[in-house]
Amino acid sequence: MPTRNGVADAHLTDEQIDALGEELDAIRAGVVDTLGEADAHYIRTVVRVQRGLEAGGRTLLLFSRVPAAWVAGTAALSVAKILENMELGHNILHGQWDWMRDPDIHSTTWEWDHASPSEMWKRSHNYEHHTFTNVRGKDRDLGYAIMRITPEQPWHPAYLLQPIYNLGLSAFFEWAIAIYDIEFDRVQEGTKSWDEAKAEMKTIWRKARKQLAKDYILFPLLSGRGAVSTLTANATAALVRNVWSHAVIFCGHFPDGVETFDEARLDGESRGQWYIRQLLGSANLTGGPLFHIMTGNLSHQIEHHLFPDVPSNRYHEIAPLVRDVCRRYGLPYSAGSLPRQYGTVLRRLARLAFPGGHKRYGGSPAPVRKLRPRTGVRLPPVTRRAA
């Protein structure tokens, strides 16, 4: 079962928290100082493989009326879309590869194969989610404004259907994220104007119409008499990508063993305390090298939240060091297989569709650690060597 809010780190003194922060800073510095040509070669190889898979898949789908071509083309395009969103787009937009100073692989120039425009994603994800990770009332990713993920969240009859509409969310995940980024919930609350929302809707539509035209008009028409079968292949590839990314992302913060926090947790939060919140609010997935790449290395969600702009190919070497830090400081390190972790997510969605849930998911809110007055933590920009 998940640990209760603020309990897992209650045994640590302020001095221990500071020491933990220094150790994690040292781990970060050790990786950053060694970034170089091997890392640049890695990301450029992933870009080439992804583009090769997409080109190969779309070429095969020109002959999509042939069953073997449909299957092979759809498989190649599915993998290409997953790689582009997970290992490339998400991580590039975090600035993980900005140190290369390559204008083609840079957070300011990359526009990913996703319905959500890059700039809107960077605001909602890079800033809001990574700054306020798992803080109730601040991190909108806790339930994406439509689900009850924690027992502290007031229950409403609409949540009875969340196990069902989670299926729809999974199937249309990229479009759901794009709509979510408009923040209609804040418009309804009166904290965001309709003019702002309308401007963002126009921005999304400019991006979305290109996505729709590419996959559901242009390439199907290029297939001639196979237009319909190519359209279904493209839709299938998008579905595979959406279902996969939904499962991986939901396993990052919603499985058993992950904590959520009161807003008071942010008061005077130090660097060490910020690190601990990221540790306790995230969960990893276990698997082999190919699995990690296909998840965009979000299978190392803990390491990603500790060091969001460190290149993802380094998380596998950081993970044992982070696990050792957790062991020595008596902190949990949540990890499990995809089926196990996603199973606990689905169980959580089913239980919290009904009132209550405190007994299984944390009981009544626990007291929050009183933190020393500190300035809010913001990880400083890192100067890296050019490849």
Image (tube, grey):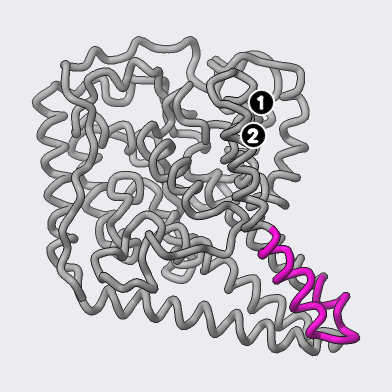
| Image quadrant assignment for residue 233 | bottom right
Q: In the drawing, does residue 4 fall left or right of residue 348?
A: left
Q: Secondary structure at mark 2?
A: helix
Q: For label 2, count other residues whose C-alpha is less than 10 Å away and answer few (under 14), some (14-19) or many (20+).
A: some
* Residue 240 sits above or below residue 171 on the image: below
Q: Secondary structure at mark 1?
A: helix
Nearer to me, 208 or 63 = 208
Q: In the drawing, does residue 193 fall left or right of residue 158?
A: left
Between the C-alphas of marks 2 and 1, the distance is: 6 Å
**Residue 219 part of the magenta segment:** yes
| Image quadrant assignment for residue 169 | top right
* Residue 384 drawn at (x, y percent): 17, 63
* Residue 98 sits above or below residue 22 on the image: below
Q: For label 1, count other residues whose C-alpha is less than 10 Å away and answer few (under 14), some (14-19) or many (20+).
A: some
Q: In the drawing, does residue 162 fall left or right of residue 134?
A: right
Three-letter amino acid code at disc 2? Arg
Farthest residue in the right direction?
A: 225
User: Which residue position is annotated with label 1?
Assistant: 351
- Residue at 58%, 73% (x, y): give it: 80
- Residue at 66%, 45% (x, y): give it: 176
Question: Could you say which disc has been placed on residue 347 in the image?
Answer: 2
* Residue 229 drawn at (x, y percent): 85, 77
- Which span is picked out in magenta? 209-231
> Can you say which quadrant of the picture contains the C terminus?
bottom left
* Residue 213 drawn at (x, y percent): 73, 68
